[in-house]
Amino acid sequence: MLKHIGTTTAAKTAPGWPLEITAMAGPPGARVTGEVDLGTLPIFDLALELLAGCSSDVVIDLAGVTFLDIGGARALAEATRQVRDSGRRLWMRSPSPQVRRMIDLLGWAALYDWEPGISRATSAAVVPLRAERKPVPAQRLMPSASAA
């Protein structure tokens, strides 16, 4: 179901699915609201694929994301890599505390492009993590291109 909101279009998943993705015209990108988990990952992947296919830098607004699982974090990292490889940026805007926590737990803050004005600093000052915790290597969690 598509609905028009001014200059944006919202693509809703099936009734009862806790995810909404709204296209943004200026700057080009998408606003994500709800939960990104195993059940909603296919629609999230599709949105990221569409963003990666744009001819300019794009923004993904994650302020409304209430849950992000490892699959969603991996999909964001892979989309960021694809966009970077083509000389553009996929800027992450306003990540919710839940998104930042998942990225912090993985130690992946450097994998993403943060919209200018957003600190790469993690939320570890708010939610302290054990000092001995080491980042999970992204290669262990993302399928390699050579394995495909």
Image (cartoon, rainbow, N blue to C red):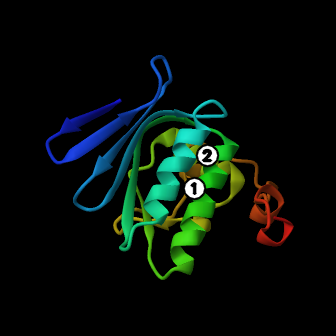
Drawn side of residue 88 relative to residue 40, left or right: left
Residue in the image at 14% along x and 42% along y: 6
The three-letter amino acid code for the residue at tag 1 is Leu
Asked if disc 1 and disc 2 are in contact, CB closer than 8 Å, the reply is yes
Q: Name the residue under label 1.
A: 76
Q: Circle 2 — which element?
A: helix
- Asked whether the viewer can see residue 128, the reply is no
Position of the N terminus by quadrant? top left
Instruction: Tell me the crowding category of disc 2: few under 14, some 14 to 19, or many 20 or more residues within 10 angstroms, Cα based.
Output: many
Residue in the image at 57% along x and 56% along y: 76
In this rendering, the answer to whether 43 lies above or below 120 is above
Residue 127: quadrant of the picture = top right
The outermost residue toward the top is 16
Drawn side of residue 110 relative to residue 31, left or right: right
Residue in the image at 50% along x and 64% along y: 120
Whole-percent x, y for residue 53 in the image: 46, 66
Drawn side of residue 19 relative to residue 70, left or right: left
The outermost residue toward the left is 6
The three-letter amino acid code for the residue at tag 2 is Gly
Whole-percent x, y for residue 134 in the image: 79, 59
Position of the C terminus by quadrant? bottom right
Whole-percent x, y for residue 8 in the image: 23, 45
Q: Which mark is residue 72?
A: 2
